Amino acid sequence: MTGKDVHLPEVLFEFRPVGRFVRVAAIDPITGIEVTMVGDVTYGEEMLKRIATRKLKYVIAKRQRQKD
């Protein structure tokens, strides 16, 4: 299973500014898995959401592979 195989119907996001950066938390409400990342404020909210979602999918897929 890869990150592309993971389907996330909903992702919850939390944005916290830290100086000129922003800390983004992405949470899958079904599994409760949470990832965090730090990005540049100039990236914009949509790009930060895409990056955080991609990381969340990667982590979910990795945990699934470890179970198998």
Image (tube, rainbow, N blue to C red):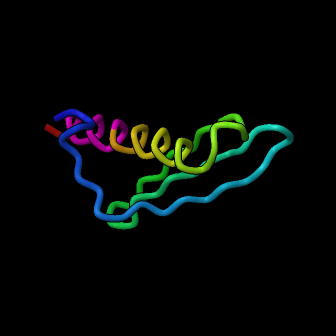
Q: Is residue 68 left or right of residue 14?
A: left
Residues 67 and 21: in front is 21
Instruction: Please state the total of marks drawn on the protein image.
Output: 0
Extreme residue toward the right, this view: 19
Quarter of the image that includes the C terminus: top left
Q: Between residues 41 and 5, which one lies in front from this camera angle?
A: 41
Q: Is residue 44 left or right of residue 12?
A: right
Eyeballing the image, is 17 above or below 63? below
* Residue 61 belongs to the span the image colors magenta: yes
Q: Nearer the viewer, residue 46 or 64?
A: 46
Residue 21 picture location, percent across and down: 76, 38
Residue 24 located left or right of residue 51: right
Which quarter of the figure has residue 3? top left
Res. 30 image quadrant:
bottom left
Q: Residue at x 39, y 66 (%)?
A: 29
**Predominant SS along the magenta part:** helix
Q: Residue at x 53, y 49 (%)?
A: 46
Q: Position of residue 14 (x, y in %)?
A: 61, 59
Q: Residue 45 colored magenta?
A: no
Please give the name of the residue rendered at 54% of the width and 59% of the height, measured from the top-left corner: 13
Q: Quadrant of the N terminus?
A: top left
Magenta region, residue range: 58-66
In the rendered image, residue 40, in percent from the top left (x then y), is placed at 70, 34
Where residue 33 sits, quadrant-wise, is: bottom left
Q: Where residue 20 sits in the image (x, y, percent)? A: 82, 38
